Every structure is written in structure tokens, then in C-alpha cells.
């Protein structure tokens, strides 16, 4: 069962690029990597998903090295509204929901 | 607005009460989920339904009883709860199961439950 490890918290300032790394040493061949964002008292919101190399969308980039034992979520030019908890999930391409484990997440605090 | 609605948004109940949480998704998705999020703890997956069939029950106590009458609606029936069951209960839906291309989950706003 793949387990993820993320820093508990990070601080940044407006306009900076933020990189949050997630470790998943036991990732299996069929596993993919997904990141969610959660604001207080709200449900998580999907940010990005990838399997290998690099994925980019309108809000973030996801970097996955060749061994796939870690992944890095990159948020360009953060603003105060990016203050939230960010979760890294490792799931099974076969749709095995037993692997839908949200860890502690990383609390990102963006300062003015 | 994610297309997933939950009612009520807040609920206070005694340990002997029976109540139900409702979730409705307007996205045409096939899978629906119940999660529990206690204060300062990670989300815990409780139940999963795919095409109205329950596919996952993560050792949830029987005082929580899910019901999925169709792909758009999901209920969580509550009875004889304990104070430690106080938490934010989140519903989510996805087009496909996670990892199958369109497995991205859309979450509702949650129901804040307090058990006295």
C-alpha cells in the first residue's frame, strides 16, 4: 500500500513560486499521482494528476522523476488566496479505491 | 460551485437521534463517495458506490448506513452516534473510478456534524 509523506507546513510570499514535494517510495507500477487543494470548511478540489515526467495545466505543474518515488507540485506566483492545505495522493490505475488515502497534507501559508 | 450539493450544511444531534445526510451530484457521474474529516485529521474514506453498487466499506461502524438509490443521490443514515463522530462529512463524485482517466473527484461543501 503506497504511503505518501509531505512536509506538514510551508510559508511563502505573494508572487513567489512554491514547490511542494511528496515522497511515495513504495509507489507501484500502476499507481498515478494526484494533488488536491482544500480550503477550511470546504471539500478538496482537484489540482493536477500525472503518471510520469511533467504535467502542466492552467494552475500548476507536476514534476515526476524517472523513479517515480517522489513528485513535486509547483505553484507559480502564489497569491494570498493560495493559502490552503495541499494533499498528495497515490492511487491505482485499476480504480482500487482502497488506495484513496489522504495524508496529513501540507499547509501552505502565503504572506503579503 | 462543484456540481455536488450536500444538505444540511450543519447538523446537531443527540446520541439517540436518527438523522440522514444527503448528497446530490449534477454532473452525470457514476461513482460517489463518503468521507469523514475530523478536526486536524486527514480525510478518511468511508464508502464508495460505483453505478449504485457499494464497492468499498472501510470498516465503518454500523451506526453509519449508506444508501445510493441512483447514480445522482447518496445518503448517509446516522443513528446512535457518539460524540467522537462529530466531524465534517464530505461527499464526492467522479465520472470513473480514480486512476481510470476521468477519476478526478468533485467534492461537495460538506456537512458539519456535532453529536452531543
Image (tube, coloured by chain):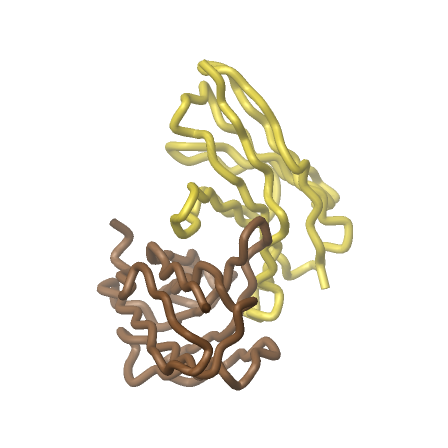
Chain colours: A yellow, B brown
Residue at (61, 44) in percent of width and height: A52
Q: Residue furthest left?
A: B26
Q: Quadrant of the N terminus of chain A?
A: bottom right
Task: Classify B107 as above or below A5.
Answer: below
Horizontal arrangement in the rendering, residue A99 relative to residue B49 (left or right): right
Q: Quadrant of the C terminus of chain A?
A: top left
Horizontal arrangement in the rendering, residue B25 relative to residue A23 (left or right): left
Q: Residue furthest right?
A: A25
Q: State the image coordinates of residue B35 (x, y, percent, origin top left).
A: 48, 65
Displayed quadrant of residue B84:
bottom right
Residue at (44, 59) in percent of width and height: B88
Task: Classify A56 as above or below B47.
Answer: above
Horizontal arrangement in the rendering, residue B113 relative to residue A66 (left or right): left
Residue at (53, 78) in percent of width and height: B56
In terms of depth relative to the viewer, which is nearer, B65 or B78? B78
Displayed quadrant of residue B90:
bottom left
Q: State the image coordinates of residue B79 (x, y, percent, origin top left).
A: 43, 83
Q: State the image coordinates of residue B106 (x, y, percent, origin top left).
A: 37, 56
Residue at (34, 58) in percent of width and height: B108
In terms of depth relative to the viewer, which is nearer, B76 or A32? B76
Q: State the image coordinates of residue A3 (x, y, percent, origin top left).
A: 71, 55
In terms of depth relative to the viewer, which is nearer, B91 or A100? B91
Amino acid at each position: 500500500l503506497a504511503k505518501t509523506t509531505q512536509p506538514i507546513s510551508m510559508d511563502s510570499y505573494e508572487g513567489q513560486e512554491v514547490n511542494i514535494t511528496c515522497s511515495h517510495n513504495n509507489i507501484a507500477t500502476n499507481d498515478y499521482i494526484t494533488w488536491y487543494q482544500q480550503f477550511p470548511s470546504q471539500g478538496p478540489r482537484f489540482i493536477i494528476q500525472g503518471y510520469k515526467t511533467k504535467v502542466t495545466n492552467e494552475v500548476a505543474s507536476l514534476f515526476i522523476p524517472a523513479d517515480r518515488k517522489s513528485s513535486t507540485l509547483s505553484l507559480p506566483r502564489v497569491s494570498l488566496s493560495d493559502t490552503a492545505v495541499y494533499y498528495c495522493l497515490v492511487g491505482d490505475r485499476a480504480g482500487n479505491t482502497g488506495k484513496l488515502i489522504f495524508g496529513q497534507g501540507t499547509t501552505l501559508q502565503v504572506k503579503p | 460551485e462543484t456540481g455536488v450539493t450536500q444538505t444540511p450544511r450543519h447538523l446537531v444531534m443527540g446520541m439517540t437521534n436518527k438523522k440522514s445526510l444527503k448528497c446530490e451530484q449534477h454532473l452525470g457521474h457514476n461513482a460517489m463517495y463518503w468521507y469523514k474529516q475530523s478536526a486536524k485529521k486527514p480525510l478518511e474514506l468511508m464508502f464508495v458506490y460505483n453505478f449504485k453498487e457499494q464497492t468499498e466499506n472501510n470498516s465503518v461502524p454500523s451506526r453509519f448506513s449508506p444508501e445510493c438509490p441512483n447514480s445522482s443521490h447518496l445518503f448517509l443514515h446516522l443513528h446512535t452516534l457518539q460524540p467522537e463522530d462529530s466531524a465534517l462529512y464530505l461527499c464526492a463524485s467522479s465520472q470513473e473510478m480514480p486512476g481510470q482517466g476521468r477519476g478526478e473527484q468533485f467534492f461537495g461543501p460538506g456537512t458539519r456534524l456535532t453529536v452531543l
